[in-house]
Each structure stands twice: as C-alpha cells, then as structure tokens.
Amino acid sequence: NAQGFLIIDENISEMDKTIYEDDNIKKKFYFCMIDGSHALCGAGSLIRKIDNQLIDFTPYILKSLESMEIGVN
C-alpha cells in the first residue's frame, strides 16, 4: 500500500565500517516507504559474519520490505 525506494550500496568506506561497527561490511542498504504524509525509512548492513561465514541477507531484506504495509490513520 506504500510507495518508496531501496538503494543497495557496495561502495564501502572506512567511515561506513566505523558507523556500522563492522570491519567485514560489504553491502549496505537504505530504504524509505512512503504513504501520504508518513514515511518509514531505515538503513543497515546486508552482510553479516555468522559462524565465521559471511552471509548475504539481501533476499531476506527485499522480501521483508515487499511484505510490509504502512497502516497509519
């Protein structure tokens, strides 16, 4: 029910590593879902190190955002 955007950024700087407190950051995302005068926006890292493996959460983030609805009255 909302419109919006998602940006996936693989251009990682040293500042990004500091901001996200993650030396292994490879991909980050920014999103905003807009419904009238209300918006839900966020950002985060798409790669996490779990059990010494780098896991890409891109498909999960995309599916999560596609399934979200903004129910503001």
Image: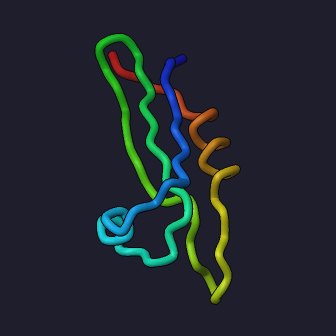
Q: Quadrant of the N terminus?
A: top right
Task: Examine the rendered structure and indicate whether residue 55 appears above or below residue 40.
Answer: below
Scheme of colours in the image: rainbow
Task: Examine the rendered structure and indicate whether residue 73 appears above or below residue 48.
Answer: above
Residue 33 in percent (x, y) is at: 45, 27
Q: Nearer the viewer, residue 69 or 25?
A: 25
Task: Examine the rendered structure and indicate whether residue 13 appears above or below residue 68.
Answer: below
Q: Residue at point 40% right, 62% down?
A: 13
Q: Nearer the viewer, residue 42 or 1?
A: 42
Q: Residue at point 70% right, 50% down?
A: 59
Residue 20 in percent (x, y) is at: 36, 66
Q: In the visual, does 34 lie left or right of 50?
A: left
Question: Which residue is outermost to the top?
Answer: 36
Q: In the visual, does 18 lie left or right of 62?
A: left
Q: Residue at point 60% right, 43% down?
A: 64
Residue 72 in percent (x, y) is at: 35, 21
Residue 29 in percent (x, y) is at: 49, 48
Q: Residue at point 44% right, 55% down?
A: 44
Task: Examine the rendered structure and indicate whether residue 61 appears above or below residue 15.
Answer: above
Which of the 4 quarters of the picture holds residue 51? bottom right
Q: In the visual, does 12 lie left or right of 46?
A: left
Q: Quadrant of the C terminus?
A: top left
Q: Nearer the viewer, residue 36 or 69?
A: 36
